[in-house]
Image: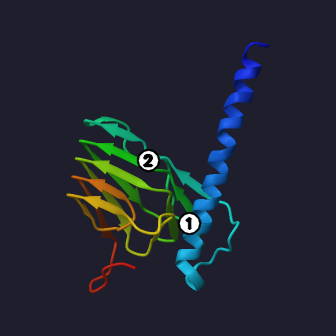
Amino acid sequence: MKRSFPYALLFASLALPAFANDQQALDQCIASWGAKSPFRKGTPASSVIATGVKVFGIGQGSHGADPETARPALVLVRPAVNVAGRSTIRLANPNGWYCFRSNVTVAGKIAIEAHCNAKIASARESGTTVGAADESDKAVAVFGAIRVTRFGCPPGKSGS
């Protein structure tokens, strides 16, 4: 037990900057939504979606519970990394305000499926594409694609 204590302290100290970066990302998203946002800067995420890493199709895609809520929910979406594969991130809460820290795809595809009423923002000011397509303009795509599609929209509405 004594041997594991220093390791526990090391991992805890490494996790603290990640939490600080998470709040910084959330604050940037809240600022990008502006007056429409129901959240004030400093509001912590009500939930976190860990999107995973895929390399050559091997690895984890998006996972985690994304339940529908009655009130607006601030959801942090951790960075998705995809190299020569395909990943799908599903954002199912119509009252979700989803804040992406960042997404990176190299010679692959990240598909973001979002409920029609879900709000999406990124902590990044703009994206970077090289020989790629990034419909979100909020990620880094190199010879790949990042596409956002909406579901659950009534006829005549394409999403917000």
Q: Quadrant of the N terminus?
A: top right
* CB-based contact (under 8 Å), mark 1 and mark 2: no
Asked if residue 70 can be seen in this view, the reply is: no
Mark 2: give few (<14), some (14-19) or many (20+) Cα within 10 Å.
many
**Count of picture labels:** 2
Quarter of the picture containing the C terminus is: bottom left
Question: In the image, residue 48 lies at what x, y percent?
Answer: 56, 52
Which quadrant holds residue 45? Answer: bottom right
Q: Residues within 10 Å of mark 1 (few under 14, many from 20)?
A: few
Residue found at x 20% / y 58%: 131
The residue depicted at 22 percent of the width and 47 percent of the height is: 107
Rendered position, 61 above or below 68: above
Image-quadrant location for residue 153: bottom left
Does any portion of residue 149 appear in the rendered image?
Answer: yes
Q: In the rendering, at what x and y percent does residue 60 appear?
A: 38, 38
Query: Which amino acid type is shown beneath numbered disc 2?
Result: Thr
Q: Is residue 61 left or right of residue 142?
A: right
Mark sitting earlier along the chain (1/2): 2
For the point 76% across and 20% down, the residue is: 5
Q: Residue at x 70, y 28 (%)?
A: 10
Residue 151, percent from left and from top: 32, 69
The residue singled out by tag 2 in the image is: 51
Task: Identify the amino acid type marked 1.
Answer: Thr
Identify the secondary structure beneath mark 1.
Answer: loop
Kindly identify which residue carries mark 1: 69
Mark nearest the camera among 1 and 2 is 2
Say which mark, if any, is on residue 49: none
Expressed as whole percent of the image width and height from the top left, the position of residue 95 reads: 52, 71
For label 2, the SS is: loop
| Relative vertical location of residue 67 with respect to residue 51 in this rendering, above or below | below
